[in-house]
Image: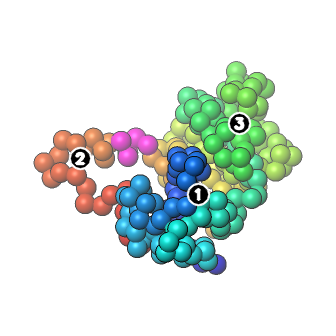
Amino acid sequence: MSISSKVMGRLTRYRALLTEYFPKDKLHVFSHELATMMGFSASQVRRDLMCLGYFGVPRYGYEVKELIHHINDVLDASKVHHVAVVGAGNLGRALMSFLGSRRATLKIVAAFDDDPQLANRLINGVPCYAMDRAEEIMKHQGITIAILCVPGSAAQRVTDRLVIAGIKGILNFAPVPIRIPVGIALEEIDVTSALERVAFYTTSRTGTPKKRRNSPQE
């Protein structure tokens, strides 16, 4: 099944809405209800959900539990992914705390840091290790995903070590782009730049940006 990254992104948002915020006593949901809550068009929601091979019925819409089940199947959410946070500073600790219980199939099992004062201790319930143990721990724990929370000056060096350690996917919060080999998944999030864009459009005479972050366009 071939699904674009934008559709995948919207499917994860539908799932989060249905599992965490949708009224528990509602057993069915219509495409126009999801569209209103997400800021998309109903036709966009229907096109996205068609990728699941699951179709609602005119009278009742989509059965919520069944819809979540189909999204999970597409996103391979039945498989537990072991995750490491690399960089146990303020951002790394905040992510450990925030992500710890949000998705049972994404399990943060280790943290790594170059600071010897942070190594060999528990941080928000997660064991933290020295970076020179990355390959050993990641292999032992079956870690395939890393969240990169290191300074920009260290980002590429640390990324190279993660690649050697066998990491398959990286979520990069470092404020610089990183280079990775073909075959490794990468998502980059620059929080400061995003906030600066918001600040610019709050004061700019040109008004708000033409393209919204949650634009339903392909």
Rendering colour mode: rainbow
Dot 2 alpha-carbon crowd within 10 angstroms: few under 14, some 14 to 19, many 20 or more: few
Q: Local crowd at mark 1 within 10 Å, few (<14), some, or many (≥20)?
A: some
Q: What residue does disc 3 label?
A: 111
Looking at the picture, tell me which residue is in the foreground, 108 or 105: 105
Q: Residue 116, percent across and down? A: 71, 24
Q: Nearer the viewer, residue 68 or 165?
A: 68
Q: In the image, which is nearer the foreground, mark 2 or mark 1?
A: 1
Q: Nearer the viewer, residue 51 or 212?
A: 51
> In the rendered image of this protein, does residue 43 appear above or below residue 112?
below
Residue drawn 45% across and 60% down? 34
Residue 68 sits inside the magenta stretch: no
Q: Quadrant of residue 186?
A: bottom right
Helix, strand or loop at label 1? It is loop
Q: Considering the numbered disc 3 on the image, is that residue within a helix, a strand or a loop?
A: strand
- The circle drawn on residue 201 is 2
Q: Position of residue 210 (x, y in %)?
A: 25, 60
Image quarter of the C terminus: bottom left
When the figure is inspected, residue 39 is found, relative to residue 89, above or below; the finding is below
Please state which amino acid type lies under the numbered disc 2. Answer: Tyr
Q: Residue at x 43, y 60 (%)?
A: 33
Write down the region rendered in magenta.
Answer: 191-195
**Dot placed on the residue nearer the N-terminal end, 2 or 1:** 1
Q: Main secondary structure of the magenta part?
A: helix
Local crowd size for mark 3, using a 10 Å CA cut-off: few (<14), some (14–19), many (≥20): many
- Numbered badge on residue 27: 1
**Three-letter residue code for mark 3:** Ala
Q: CA distance from mark 3 to mark 1?
A: 39 Å
